[in-house]
Image (cartoon, rainbow, N blue to C red):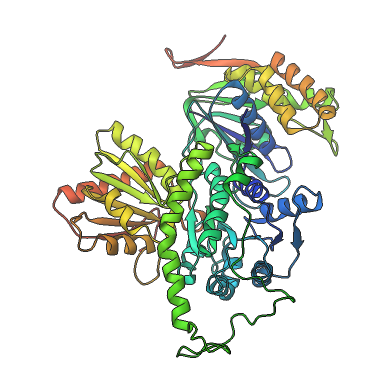
Amino acid sequence: MQEVLWHGRGGQGVVLAAQILGEAAYIQGFKGITSAPTFGPERRGAPVAASTRISDEPIRTFSQIEAADVAVVLDATLLTMIDILGRLKERGMIIVNTPLAPDQIGIEGCFDVASVDASGIAREQRLTVGGFPIVNTPLLGAFAKATGLVSITNIERGLKKKMPADRAIANCAAIRTAFENTIVKRHDSKTGTSDKK
Amino acid sequence: MSDVRIITGNEAASLGVKLCEPKVVAAYPITPQSALAETLSRYVEGGELKAEYVRVEGEHSALTVCISASTVGARVFTATSSNGLLYMHEQLHWAAGSRLPIVMCCVNRGVGAPWSIFNDQQDSISQRDTGWIQMYCRDNQEIIDSMIQAYRIAEEVYVPVMICYDGFVLSHTMMPVTIPDIESVRKFLPPYKPHTILSPEDPRTINSVLLPVRRANPEGVLCDGYMEMRYKLQAALDQSRDVIRKANELFAHTFGRNHGGMLWEYMTDDADLILTGMGSIAAEATVAADILRAEGVKAGVVGIRVFRPFPKDDVITAFGHAKAIVVFEKGISYGYEGALCSDLKAAFFGTDSKAPIHNYIAGLGGRDVKPRELVEAGKTTLAAVEAGRMNHEIKWLNCYTG
């Protein structure tokens, strides 16, 4: 089972991202899918999280994820605010929305790091709400690139199940651009250091 | 080709209601049930569900509308949570006493005070003795399937049914659910035939005051008194066990999914240690059983699907050979122990089962319950039993006081 945690701020669409990934993974052929918001009241701008579980078998656990296989960070300022790495497995993958390269983000420890300028890509595609870039969909493209769990085609199919066709066009373009521009730096488990591949 | 959608528990419940085609829906929104009430209102407004949606000022009225509509011959639905269910309390008794086959969802949530919007099962557990059938669902597929079974059961025995599922844990978690097709549902669920229809063409007095003794009606026929009518409610619940089992079997035959009738079992055949509970915590326990098995402990799970009527004979067969039993409960009868634990002990009394029962009160007010915690609880219990400590125990899981 692969456990994915989406970290963002209320209004950034972490819940929708978790759901689209669920749809995409189901299309990919995984039989076990759950996606859930952080349970409780939602507040725009406050740190929020959502989760996706993906498995070959139907899922029988609905408890909160303690240590995720993948963490996706929609707002890099959250890295210093909440303990995102504390809820990530050792050698897990963290994907961050940032114009910085993976080794410039300041993430220490045994993790694979991926970065993509999702905000920049969203602005290019004019994906904004109230002036703020929509970063959840480009990060799904980054997810496909960084993890290889779900194909970019299935991410797009999953997205089309959750939004109308006219809105899907720009979002799919953002997903493709993000996929192509995601930089992945894998942790080298032999030496204990990080090495760009 | 089957229709699989990735949906929340509340969406599964809404689709289940739609498939059962009630004529009247009355519900008052309350977290975490709100999305269910909202979706049904949208179905009615959009013409997808040919029903009247009666907006009310509170839960007491919501159930009263259902009681009235059911009395004039309509299939009805309502849903609530927590303090909303408690506010219905008087009418819960009234619905069961009137023998009306109302189906309701209780999206389980802790009750105030202190205030909580999060999951436990104190709400429905505290309504145990109102004469309703109570079913607990372990995942979203079971919610939609149980809804369809519930109307069939309710309308056969004329007892209302409460479909309980864990708030947020299931109500707000999406997972793949196969949606039954409407034609098969119509075949499985025959049209509702009311036992009495209150109508201006056939005026009757229903539920007038009854005296302690039986009395003759104007035609001189000796009629049931209060006690006889209450006995018949109990008899109907006793008889409903077979109806519930048969409804499950017919459902499995029709739709290919068997949710277990009164209860379900997971790897219990050779189990020394049996974990049990109701709703999603029982699903969580199956993951714990997998972990325990991988460590060499013969563990299994019994999921109690129907709490009322209590599966008194089924549990003796299911738990009979266990050396130790752990009961996880998201509620408690304050001043004693978990309600399920008490019922299990009573069912085992006088049988060969001498297994110590450890009762864990868990997950109150939404406190997370993880499989590894259930594993630890199971190991602790088994170690105590293997050390010869045969007494029953009650503990609070993940509670940091006392």
Residue located 44% across and 60% down the image: B240
Q: Residue at x 25, y 37 (%)?
A: B297
Side of A174 where B321 appears, left or right: left
Quarter of the image that includes the C terminus of chain B: bottom left
- B351 or B360, which is in the foreground? B351
Residue B397 seen by the camera: yes
Instruction: Please state the horizontal and vertical placement of residue B292, each as a whole percent of the image.
Output: 30, 37
The image position of residue B283, as x and y in percent, is 43, 43
Where B283 falls versus B96 (above or below)? above
Q: Up-down: is B19 above or below B225?
A: above
Frontmost residue, B257 versus B362: B257
Q: Would residue B109 be visible to someone looking at this image?
A: no
Residue B288 appears left or right of B126: left
Q: Nearer the viewer, residue B18 or A196?
A: B18
Q: Give the answer, above or below, for where A127 lies relative to B219.
A: above
**View extreme (front): residue:** B219
What is the x, y in percent for residue B130?
Answer: 49, 71
